[in-house]
Amino acid sequence: MELYIAGGVGEHGRNCFFLQNGGDAILVDCGLMAGSDDPLPRLTESQIRKLKAVFLTHSHADHTGALPWLLRQGYTGPIISTTPTLQQLPFIVQNAVALEQVAPRNEKCNGITWGLSGHCEGSVWLKLDWDDKAILFSGDYTEQSAVYPCDVLRNQVADLAV
Ligand SMILES: [Zn+2]
């Protein structure tokens, strides 16, 4: 399994993580870097063709704003996130799939474990088990929110945390 950081680490915006295992790949987040001359995730056509699913940690534009661009590049697979996140997107996505239908909250199912991240309505952290490895995406995680619930991460075990 290989992780390719297509944006967002050391930058404010365009959070986008491409995870590949053989010929299959998934994306976690597809953000836009607002106000930049170079706002899109650094994904190639061949990477986009391999994508089997896109997961979203939450609705903010720095995690989702490049989805319309991804769809224009020909991506037609599922876009998976919580129902509140999908409802907050300011554009229409085809093949939206509710994360709650794929795996129950706080229970590993189909290689996916997720919990609420305390950042905004519907925001989640995600742990993906794939190819005998576990990789954890924290999203924008906070335990201090007085408004949004958070399922604490610290007891999760993973080979890599992003
Ligand atoms: Zn955010």
Image: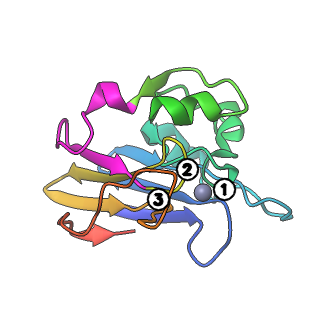
Q: 16 left or right of 2?
A: right
Residue 1 seen by the camera: no
Q: Which residue is mark 3?
A: 139
Which residues are drawn in magenta? 99-117
- Quadrant the C terminus occupies: bottom left
Queried on whether the Cβ of the residue with tag 1 lies below 8 angstroms from ligand 1, the answer reads: yes
* Residue beneath the point at 37% across and 32% down: 99
Image coordinates of residue 117 in percent, x first then y, are 42, 55
Q: 125 left or right of 134?
A: right
CA gap between label 3 and label 1 equals 11 Å
Queried on whether the Cβ of the residue with tag 3 lies below 8 angstroms from ligand 1, the answer reads: yes
Q: Earlier in the sequence, mark 3 or mark 1?
A: 1
Closer to the camera in the image, 92 or 119: 119
How many neighbours does mark 2 have within 10 angstroms: few (below 14), some (14-19), or many (20 or more)?
Answer: many
Type of the residue with mark 3: Gly
Q: Which residue is mark 1?
A: 62
- Would you place residue 8 above or below residue 76 in this image? below
* Residue beneath the point at 20% across and 63% down: 156
Q: 123 left or right of 40?
A: left
Q: Which residue is mark 2?
A: 120
Q: Earlier in the sequence, mark 2 or mark 1?
A: 1
| Residue 17: mark in rendering | none
How many neighbours does mark 3 have within 10 angstroms: few (below 14), some (14-19), or many (20 or more)?
Answer: many
